[in-house]
Image: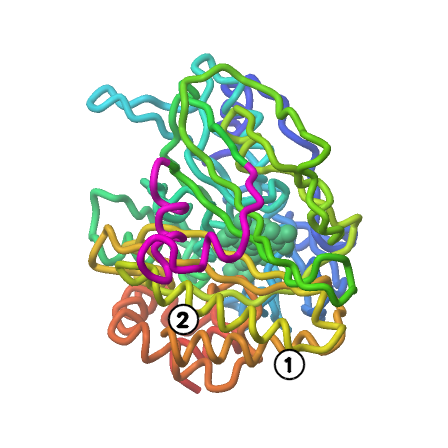
Amino acid sequence: MTKTEQSQVSNQSGVKQPPVKAMVGTPLAVLNGVSFSTDSATNWSKSLSWQPEATFYPRTLEDLQVIVREAKKQNKTVRCSGTGHSWCSTSVTQDFLVSVNSMNKIHKPQQSTEDGQWTVKIEMGVTIEELDVFLRQNDTPLALATNVLIDDVRYGGVLTMGCHGPMFNFRTLSDLITELTIVNAHGDLVTYSENGDPAAFSAACLNLGLLGIIYTATLRVEPMTTRLLMKDLNPTLESVFGNADGGIGLSLKKLALENVDGFQLFHWPFKQFKEPEQNDRVWVKTWKRTNEALSKKEVDPKSVPEVDHPLFKTFAVGEQVLDTPDALHYEMGGGGSTATIVGVAIKVDEDFKNIAEAFTELNWAFSTSSPERRLTILEMRFVKASNKLMSPMYDEDSNAIYCMMSLYAISGTPGFKEYSKGIAENWIKKYNGIPHWPKEWEHISNVVPHIREQYGDRIDTFNKVRKVQDPNDMFVNDVWRSVLYGN
Ligand SMILES: Cc1cc2nc3c(=O)[nH]c(=O)nc-3n(C[C@H](O)[C@H](O)[C@H](O)COP(=O)(O)OP(=O)(O)OC[C@H]3O[C@@H](n4cnc5c(N)ncnc54)[C@H](O)[C@@H]3O)c2cc1C
């Protein structure tokens, strides 16, 4: 696409494009028209910092091609970054880092004349918030049917890493892609579409940044004709994980699936921040699609939870009807602190028994743990299977349900790394848990052999697709080399 064509795209959109933001430092120099700096880089939680030889700030497709051709000429590897919210070392490189944050064009949404389906094509530096705002202002207001919790991360990051929201019928964000364009290691722009080769499309939709630099993605969106009824509940542990419905797991299943479209559960094991009294309740949020009018939450002061964990100070029991983006990106506390998190996908048994057991075991572990661990939180969401080769929720049964189980704490919580490692190891060994790519998982013992065993032939299929685009592993860093090759 030429620069003239790009400005036409911006004009078509009719929406002011947001200012350019760069994740790391200030551009210092220019290479063939592309700005770059030699700043060091760090992720959001500050758990990782690294020194790329150069960090590039492309603005156009041609810029991406310049970077790739330069990398080829100098025999450099290339990794991309967005807002930097991933915990694993996916963006770490000593060579070229590409911050795609200035590539934030949004094309005018299109409606198919065949089936009426709406889609929107975007560049990969677009943040979740920018697209939400843009889609709402469309003549027919539009929204994504599911999304991640926070809205300052970028589509390059969430699509590449297989991210998900709480709406179990809409799977992961990668499952909303209808077309993707990627600049490969030859500098060519390759298009992957749902009407093309299924294996290549599947590999491309969740590619971990390993097929090249994604230029654009086209996503399925929908008219905002429905809203979300969002409920906050504070039931007892016993009512969710006990036997009342005829077996452990069945009450959880009922709460998570019956008459709702989305579900999220939090448990913080102690009532008061850092104090020893155990919490006998869990926090549940549910989402249900509705045609009801917008409504504000009436908060009963008596229902405000006793817990005073800083991450959840915004929570209060009640219900409200919100537009989809507002309900999906609800406010959490935290006061500027960052969090650290391990998370796995566990295939849910028919009766949810394995999930209830995994939770109950963990709750026991909480109760016998040291004071520092009182800062930890358990979270679970349920998502239907994905058909993307590299998804931890991949399943040939499209109705299979996966539990995204996460354990987190405020960054720097003493002992959390070791503790979370033990918990994650148990989830992996006992429940066949598969790490969620953006989270922390590299510290888990024997994790790579486990991942390679779980993904099996899918890694070979992915590698076949990948090798056509990147025969000399330009886009492979150490973490992905171990997953792709086992060493
Ligand atoms: C507070 C918080 C809440 C979160 N909530 C959720 C949630 O609800 N659900 C969920 O699933 N995850 C969640 N996450 C995880 C988060 O969505 C992922 O880490 C996501 O990848 C972050 O996007 P980013 O823009 O920060 O990407 P980064 O972390 O900067 O980049 C991740 C990777 O994206 C790839 N990439 C980016 N752009 C391109 C491109 N153009 N071409 C090729 N590769 C590219 C690269 O491989 C890069 O290494 C959360 C994280 C935080 C910190």
Asked if residue 138 lies in the magenta stretch, the reply is no
**x 55%, y 41%: residue:** 233
Does residue 482 lie above or below 459 as drawn?
Answer: below
| Label 1 CA crowd tier, 10 Å (few <14, some 14–19, many 20+) | few
Quadrant in which the N terminus is drawn? top left
Cα separation between marks 2 and 1? 18 Å
**Quadrant of residue 199 within the rendered picture:** bottom left
* Front residue (pair 72, 260): 260
- Residue 66 visible in the current orientation: no
Q: Are marks 2 and 1 in contact (CB under 8 Å)?
A: no
Q: Amino acid at mark 1?
A: Glu
Residue that numbered label 2 is attached to: 433
Q: Amino acid at mark 2?
A: Gly
Magenta range: 232-259
Residue that numbered label 1 is attached to: 418
**x 47%, y 57%: residue:** 161
Quadrant in which the C terminus is drawn? bottom left
Q: Secondary structure at mark 2?
A: loop
